[in-house]
Image: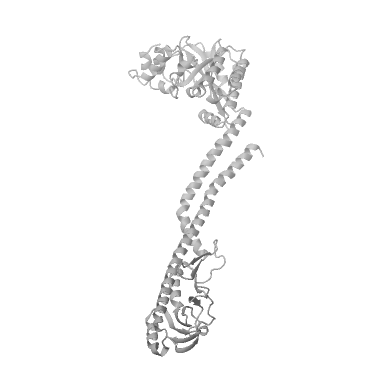
């Protein structure tokens, strides 16, 4: 597999992964958020259950405190009052009195109903405390329904007890957990669990059941809440439906950004390198007219990229890509090689200028001077004069080093021009700091020449400044007779633009020079031209 194709395949994989990654992260984060949401619901439910259990416990201990008034009194003296208290107070299944382990009084079963073990259907716990509570699977009177017993034992072996019916707790637990499918379990100390809800299967969906446990800070009461996976799935779907559009947009945006980045980081670099080797680049030349000699005395070299399909890539696109990908120096060297091949066929007068655009990165490259001297050596058999066309931003960085390089090349007979003057960030002091020969006025100022009565103060100021600094002036982008006449009348020596000649390939330029090189500019027959005769 060719390296470029392999890189493109890798790029496709990266683009796909960049689109999938937000979706995977979205799924992960929404799953985490769903679990957090369910946990918050569990915490709220547990707090509500514990609060209700504590209220019932408070009622039970208050009842036992009330029962202590019957201490040292036989059951026969308060049996009626005991039955009335047991019937009128909510939650209670029965209340009564103890002597050791013997139940001596019961609001439900009268006197001598049996022992505490018989009533609880299990042995009392050994706690070492005078008071304790315990959840029961059932009692002797109601064996199939849970209950909670509260016991207070006194120093003289007497004691009092109260049993709360577990149905009250079960009803309350069902009301809280039914809508969400909870399985709820409550224990008082190490007693039997009071449970409502069905046990969920180990994995009923993509999510396993989530368990939460809580403990009362006042009494030995614990609560366990088990949420089924289906409830977690429902919570996850709700969160996903909210965030899915945002995640999808982020996924698409990241894919686009990744594709653009890869196109610049991989495709352009490789495509330019491949195009150089495949000789897909060529040079077009745009002639420059000299008003003094009334002839063509130079041409600007313009790099063009034509694909095997016949399509062309715009210079502003591939030049920007080459600068961004560190390919501008190899590309400029290739341009110099192509020019050196073309000019061997030219038949021009001595001093004919060949303008070469120099990128800022190449100008600041350590090998720049050597590159230009090697190019000059290749074309030394031709009577050409090399003109280096620099943009204003080329002079901003490392100004002293740039000035030394330009002085070295000017000493070898090359000329220096500032291209697109007035559009960059150049200080006017640069015009005196750097050794320059030409100033090329940007086409934007040329286009400002709109009518014979119109004023172009910025253009006039640039031209006057150039004359005072003894710089030759070239107007580029000249497209009409009006623009040409305006510039000529203000002493602009060199003219470049469609009005004079379009860029053309090497063969076309050779034919054009043979026919037009010594011909003066022909002014179109128009009202504008008549007001500015040549």
Q: Which residue is drawn at the image coordinates 61% and 42% (left, top)?
A: 10
Q: Position of residue 133 (x, y in %)?
A: 48, 76
| Furthest residue toward front | 156
Above or below residue 497? Residue 237 is below
Q: Position of residue 30 (x, y in %)?
A: 50, 55
Q: Which residue is drawn at the image coordinates 43% and 82% (left, top)?
A: 95
Does residue 449 appear to the left or right of 331 in the view shown?
left
| Furthest residue toward left | 453
Q: Position of residue 260 (x, y in %)?
A: 53, 39
Position of the C terminus, as image quadrant, is: top left
Does residue 482 appear to the left or right of 272 in the view shown?
left
Above or below residue 513? Residue 213 is below
Q: Position of residue 13 (x, y in %)?
A: 59, 45
Figure quadrant of residue 527: top left
Between 514 and 144, the residue placed more toward the observer is 144
Between 61 and 418, the residue placed more toward the observer is 61
Position of the N terminus, as image quadrant, is: top right
Between 190 and 200, the residue placed more toward the observer is 190
The answer to whether residue 135 shows anywhere in this view is: yes
Above or below residue 36? Residue 128 is below
Does residue 99 appear to the left or right of 337 in the view shown?
left
Question: How many discs appear?
Answer: 0
User: Which colour scheme appears in the figure?
Assistant: one colour
| Furthest residue toward right | 1
Between 196 and 411, the residue placed more toward the observer is 196
Does residue 73 appear to the left or right of 209 in the view shown?
left
The answer to whether residue 285 shows anywhere in this view is: no
């Amino acid at each position: 597999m060719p390296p470029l194709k392999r890189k493109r395949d890798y790029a496709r994989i990266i683009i796909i992964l960049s689109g999938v990654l937000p979706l995977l992260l979205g799924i992960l984060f929404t799953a985490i958020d769903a679990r957090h949401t369910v946990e918050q619901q569990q915490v709220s439910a547990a707090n509500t259950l514990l609060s209700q259990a504590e209220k019932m416990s408070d009622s039970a201990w208050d009842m036992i405190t009330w029962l202590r008034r019957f201490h040292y009194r036989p059951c026969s003296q308060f049996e009626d009052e005991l039955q009335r208290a047991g019937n009128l107070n909510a939650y209670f299944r029965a209340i009564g009195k103890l002597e050791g382990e013997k139940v001596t009084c019961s609001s439900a079963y009268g006197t001598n109903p049996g022992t505490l073990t018989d009533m609880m259907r299990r042995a009392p716990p050994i706690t070492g405390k005078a008071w304790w509570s315990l959840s029961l699977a059932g009692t002797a009177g109601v064996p199939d329904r849970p209950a909670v017993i509260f016991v207070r034992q006194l120093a003289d072996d007497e004691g009092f007890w109260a049993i709360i019916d577990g149905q009250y707790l079960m009803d309350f637990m069902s009301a809280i957990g039914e809508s969400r499918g909870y399985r709820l379990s409550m224990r008082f100390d190490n007693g039997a669990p009071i449970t409502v809800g069905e046990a969920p299967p180990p994995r009923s969906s993509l999510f396993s059941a989530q368990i939460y446990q809580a403990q009362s800070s006042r009494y030995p009461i614990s609560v366990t809440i088990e949420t089924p996976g289906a409830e977690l799935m429902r919570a996850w779907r709700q969160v996903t439906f909210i965030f899915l559009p945002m995640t999808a947009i982020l996924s698409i945006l990241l894919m686009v950004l990744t594709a653009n980045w890869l196109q610049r980081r991989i495709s352009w670099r490789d495509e330019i390198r491949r195009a150089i080797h495949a000789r897909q680049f060529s040079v077009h030349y745009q002639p420059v007219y000299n008003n003094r000699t009334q002839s063509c005395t130079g041409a600007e070299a313009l790099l063009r990229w034509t694909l095997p399909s016949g399509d062309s890539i715009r210079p502003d696109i591939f030049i920007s890509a080459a600068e961004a990908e560190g390919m501008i120096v190899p590309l400029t060297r290739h341009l110099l090689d192509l020019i050196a091949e073309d000019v061997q066929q030219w038949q021009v007068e001595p001093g004919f200028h060949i303008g070469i655009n120099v990128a800022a990165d190449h100008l600041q490259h350590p090998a720049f001077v050597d590159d230009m001297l090697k190019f000059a050596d290749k074309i030394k058999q031709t009577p050409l004069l090399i003109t280096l066309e620099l943009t204003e931003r080329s002079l901003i960085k490392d100004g002293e080093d740039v000035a030394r390089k330009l002085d070295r090349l000017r000493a070898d007979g090359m000329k220096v021009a500032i291209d697109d003057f007035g559009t960059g960030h150049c200080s006017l002091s640069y015009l005196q700091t750097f050794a320059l020969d030409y100033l090329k006025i940007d086409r934007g100022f040329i286009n400002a020449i709109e009518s014979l009565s119109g004023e172009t103060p910025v253009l006039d100021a640039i031209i006057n400044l150039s004359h005072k600094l003894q710089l030759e002036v070239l107007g580029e982008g000249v497209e009409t007779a009006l623009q040409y006449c305006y510039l000529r009348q203000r002493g602009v020596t060199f003219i470049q633009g469609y009005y004079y000649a379009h860029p053309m390939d090497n063969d076309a330029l050779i034919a054009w020079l043979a026919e037009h090189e010594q011909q003066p500019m022909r002014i179109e027959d128009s009202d504008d031209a008549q007001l500015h005769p040549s």
